[in-house]
Amino acid sequence: MNTDLETIKNEKYFIEKLCSIKGLNGQLGHTLYSCFGSFSGIFKASEKELSSLLPPALVRAVKEAENKDFISANEDGNPLRMRFTCIYDEDFPKRLKRISDCPLGLWHIGDFPGDNIPSVAIIGARECSPYGEFVAKSLGSFLGEAGVSVVSGLARGVDGISQAAALSAGGTSYGVLGSGADVCYPSSNRVTYNKLKESGGIISLYAPGEAAMSQNFPPRNRIVSGLADAVVVVEAKQKSGTLITVDMALEQGREVFVVPGRITDRTSDGCNALLSQGASVFLSPEIFLCELNEIFNLKKEAEKECPKEPAEAHPIGNHKYSSKLQRSEKLNSTKKAFSGRHEFPEGLSDDEIAVLSTTSLTPKTTDEILASLPGFEYATVAMILMQLLIAGHVDQVSQGSFVRVY
Amino acid sequence: MFSKIISGSLLGVDAILISVEVDVSNGLPYFSMVGCPGSEVRESKERVFAALKNTGLSAPSARITVNLSPADIHKEGTSYDLPIAIALLLSCEMLPKGCTDNCLIAGELGLNGEIKPIRGVLSLAKKAADEGTGKIIIPAENAREGAVIPGIDVIGVSSLKELFNYLKDPAEYPLTITKVDAASLLSESECSEDSMPDFNEVHGQAAAKRASMISAAGFHSMLMTGPPGVGKSLIAKRIPTILPPLSLEEALEITAVYSVAGKLSSDKSLITSRGFEAPHHSLTLPALIGGGTNPRPGAVSMAHRSVLFLDELTEFDRKSIDSLRQPLEDHIVNISRANYSVTYPADFLLICAMNPCPCGYYPDRNRCNCTEPVLRKYLSKISGPILDRIDLCVEMTQVKLDEMGSTTENESSESMRNKVMKAREMQKKRYAETAYRFNSEVSGTDIEGYCNLGDKEVKFLKSIYEKFSLSLRSYHRILRVSRTIADLSGSENVLKEHILEAVNFRPNFEYWRNL
């Protein structure tokens, strides 16, 4: 037994070493393992043996790594609390084991999303509009409050906003980075990054110290959707990286929910296109939560039926529980679509309501608001807007543009 | 023999009197010039000798010494040609003794004896009048410029011959004294302002128009942001039309700057309307602030008592923009050189315009694709200290086409100017006993005292202070602008509505800094 444990520990060291070589933390790693029988064996293999399986650059990288001292993240005294968890560990996320091209292991600070808690990936544009910001924020905090894990990429825009909202609602959130888990990218999200370490986790495919490079992001997106039961697309332009994640999510059999946008908003073109291709419509956080629970339960049942699904041989596009949902029933249920947000706050004067009613999530300047209010004086509108701003009913997004706070 | 003529030298927009002394004595022919002359002054020997010869007067073959006194001040420019020539003629006794007494002479000579215009005649004339000199002889082209100064006879001459004859025998060859009535020039120009742009040509843009009026009333600097083509320059160009008409004193100050810069055209004797200085963003620091080896006023001084418009503020060199701090505070520019320093007036109204982002359309995400780091970098080109000195910020958007065609009468510049003047009147009364002129100048410690705030307003201000986590400086800025808004509405007390409007125009630092 002792020797076995020793071997496993030793093997894990080599898995981590293999994973630290960029490009081998996935299908190629699995192939190497099956060829050489053990992970330590990979590093003992000759150049010739390797070159039949790997491109020359990777062969060189393996050979270089072989002679280099490698310090495992799991060694004691790691100041960052960073761990490396491999696919053979008990606590490796079960959801990931079921996707194709599953990574051999992940570095992480904090935990993984719990296997027994529903998990949602919220994704969307970096340059989001106030509408996207609003949806990301309300969805994030709603899910956070409901105890659902929110997974995302901690990017600017929708990602970071939804994660920050989930955390401040007291929920848990998991950030999958395109850099090493110890590298905070983008640095503007440092506050959220630090909070994630405490209530959730930072997860990465890449070895500590790895910089955020553009080619790191598509594999990262695969993990984001892989860790979730459902994916919500908040805002995406026609050509958007978000759509790549959606493709991966569909490959992995994840249900994709899309927040519809106005046809005049370029920032929602990608979303509307997905909807036209048959993606599920995201109607409100409440309805979404019902649907999520259903998906989660269906999935649990499916697992019970077939508990030992091998990691590699998972069928792509398992749509057992998608699209079959009884949507019409859901809509008739007591849950309302974005309920309670259409009434005006109490205690406002008629003029204030008139001004407030012209504002929306599309930024408008005082002049534009004035133009839609015939009979109002400029000074009056300016004054009322400021009153509404101070009272927190509108928000200022640039020097002089206002959006409504719902 | 020795002779002496009074001339003058420019020091900033002021002048000092310089004695041009010439001594002609027997000896080998020799010419020397002393008294700290600059290179142009040294060259005057050649011009003087050639001009004398070509006028039919011969320079003596003798030992000639020219001294420019006081000898420790650096002399520049070409205005010493004429006094040197006349002093030389006096020394050779070709002109009667005493013919140039009580007379200041300045002018540049051509080789053929013609007299060419010089810079800064207005300042010279003013200094001469102050010193009690009765007469000033200057190039004919500058005559109208000098003539606006009362209490001195201005004689314009166009050639050395003409002047020589006049000095020799004024009865035989009289020269006319140029007369200009500055006050009537000023009032005449007011009536003939038809060709000026007018605010009634601007459709929509209520916020920017209102901000312009507040800016003009309290001399508050203003920044307009907005997409290209919304009319930022259009608005800026019309701001001089709502500033109060120039007083004679102000007109003379502006004319002096133009005169020193050599930008006054010969047919104009007085600048009678407020200018609009809009330098291109590629301008250098000396061009903006003033300077150069021979210091000249920069754009800030050319905009004295009027509008300095910096379009595309973010494209300006950051160093140039930062250098605006001193003139904005002190209303003057000090340019120091190794052995002297000059001061130019720079009391201007700063109006700036910029796009909200590199592509120009933020926050309209349908059109703007600028990423956050790009936006942040773009906005950070405006340094904090300058943003701190901007009282009014206004965002402009495209005017709808139906608004453009609307038949309703837009407020004219004249009506806006009347409101501005009423507000100025209130400020004048309020600050009569103090050094302040406008609300924008009142210091942070004093402004609260001038606002006559009620309990309600004090409480309200406190809530704003907390809500927007203002700095004390921003807080005082809001008070200053509120004071002007109250003045515009004729209210002695600053009320909540005035404060609210001022808050609307505050620089939104959340947008500027923490994007």
Image: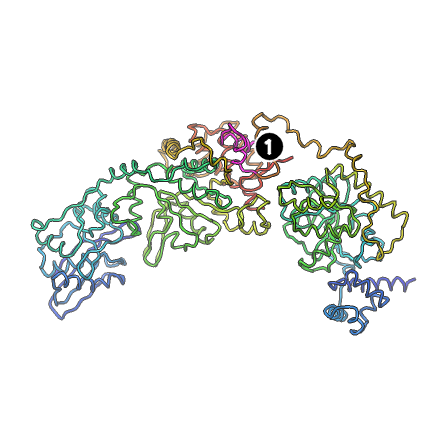
Chain at numbered mark 1? A
Residue farthest to the right, as pictured: A1
Task: Specify start and end residues of the magenta stretch as a single range.
Answer: A364-392
Q: Is residue A111 visible?
A: no
Q: Residue at x 12, y 58 (%)?
A: B90
Residue B166 image point, x, y percent = 11, 52
Query: Does the stretch in magenta take in B80?
Result: no
Mark 1 surroundings within 10 Å by alpha-carbon count, few (fewer than 14), some (14 through 19), many (20 or more): few
Residue type for callout 1: Ala
Q: Main secondary structure of the magenta part?
A: helix
Which of the 4 quarters of the picture holds residue A206?
Answer: bottom right
Q: Is residue A379 visible?
A: yes
Query: Which residue is denoted by mark 1 in the rendering?
Result: A391
Residue A78, given in percent of the width and then of the height, sits at 75, 58
- The residue lying at 43 percent from left, 29 percent from top is B489
Looking at the image, how many numbered discs can be counted on the residues? 1
Q: Is B202 drawn above or below residue B278 in the view shown? A: above
Residue A3 sits above or below residue A197 on the image: below
Q: How is the image coloured?
A: rainbow
Which of A361/B172 is in front?
A361
Relative image position of residue B482 (x, y in whole percent): 47, 33
Q: Quadrant of the N terminus of chain A?
A: bottom right
- Provide residue B223's location: percent of width, then percent of height: 47, 43
SS at badge 1: helix
User: Position of B250 compared to B180: left or right?
Assistant: right
Image quadrant containing the C terminus of chain A? top right
Q: Residue at x 31, y 48 (%)?
A: B257
Residue A376 covered by magenta stretch: yes
Q: Quadrant of residue B460?
A: top right
Would residue A318 be found to the left or right of residue B80 on screen? right
